[in-house]
Amino acid sequence: MKQLGNLKYFLGIEVARSKHGIFLCQRKYTIDLLSETELLGSKPVDTPIEQNHKLFQCSNSANIGKGW
Amino acid sequence: MLKFSKHRQRLVGKLIYLSHTHPNITYEVNVVSQFMHDPRKLHMDVVEKILRYLKSTPGKGILFSNHGNLKVEGYTDADWAGSNDDRRSTSGYFTFVGGNLVTWRSKKQLVVARYSAEAEFRGMTLGVCELLWIKNVLSDLGFKQNETMSLYCDNTLAIAIAHNPVQHDRTKHVEIYRHFIKEKLEVGIISFPFVRSELQLADVLTKGVSSKMFNESLFKLGMCDIHAPT
């Protein structure tokens, strides 16, 4: 088998090594996804979901209230 | 509204792939995946929000570094009756080896829990299974673990029941879980230290949390951005 040296990039995952340790990220994959969805120019947010945000199935959302 | 509407499922599939280096979006991705058989605007709005969050930190990832030990520990939490559609709970865990995050999961439970401690209990069981698996993998690799593994949990009632099967009335229907956990406790494989809710890492796997709490958890999970200017 051919020795390709240290792993740098595999299946969209970037690998970096230093004396601090090994770092994994998917920077390129994320940016490609953002450009595909045309969200590169969108306003960034702090958290991926609002606090205590609840999602419903569309058909039920009308008749299920909060609590019991 | 996302213009990518024809490929909604594929888009969420990509987000699932992205959670490999973004453990902090696991819960959100898990939530939107539950609706992908019939994705609507309200669901895609959440997907868009996840993407806009990623836009703020595209280069964030996980750093694995040497902390001088190989201690195996985990954090588990559950959000009781969190699903508004069917009132099932969501539980999640993070596991660490030597202070580095290794595995994590956020899962809506398969049955409705009658009490919050019960939801927590089912979550604890999943966490225990994961820790036992890690222990096995490590021992296969030649790193035998004899130390007790800690699974941090913020529900005192669930911890109390694990140690001493009181409250029989409330837990008789989850007896197998209870005995499974008690067995592991008694042989000293595992312990359940209490952790205050505000130090509970696994909260981000079970519900949407405040941005303060969210950002604190990033640091504790070993997430950082090496590309970011310091």
Image (cartoon, coloured by chain):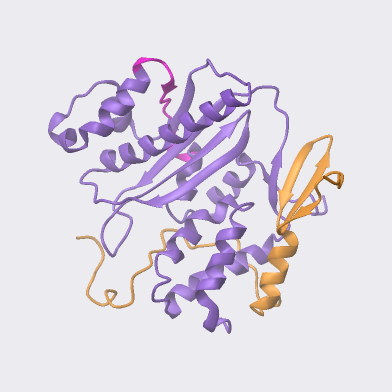
Q: Is residue B162 magenta?
A: no
Residue drawn at the location 25% of the way across and 21% of the way down:
B164
Tell me residue B70's x, y (percent).
63, 24
Residue B107 showing in the rendered view: yes
Q: How many marks?
A: 0
Look at the picture and state if B18 lies above or below B1.
above
Look at the picture and state if B70 lies above or below B7.
above
Q: Nearer the viewer, residue B162 or A2?
A: A2
Chain identifier, colour purple: B
Q: Quadrant of residue B102?
A: top right
**Is B137 situated left or right of B120 in this image?**
right
**Is A11 situated left or right of A61 in this image?**
right
Q: Farthest residue to the front: give it.
A: A1
Residue B1 showing in the rendered view: no
Is most of the magenta stretch helix, strand or loop?
loop
Residue drawn at the location 60% of the way across and 30% of the way down:
B97
Q: Colour of chain A?
A: orange
Residue drawn at the location 58% of the way across and 81% of the way down:
B4
Tell me residue B71's x, y (percent).
58, 24
**Is B107 situated left or right of B122 in this image?**
right
Q: Quadrant of residue B19?
A: bottom right
Residue drawn at the location 80% of the way across and 54% of the way down:
B227
Tell me residue B13's x, y (percent).
54, 66
The magenta-colored residue range is B186-198
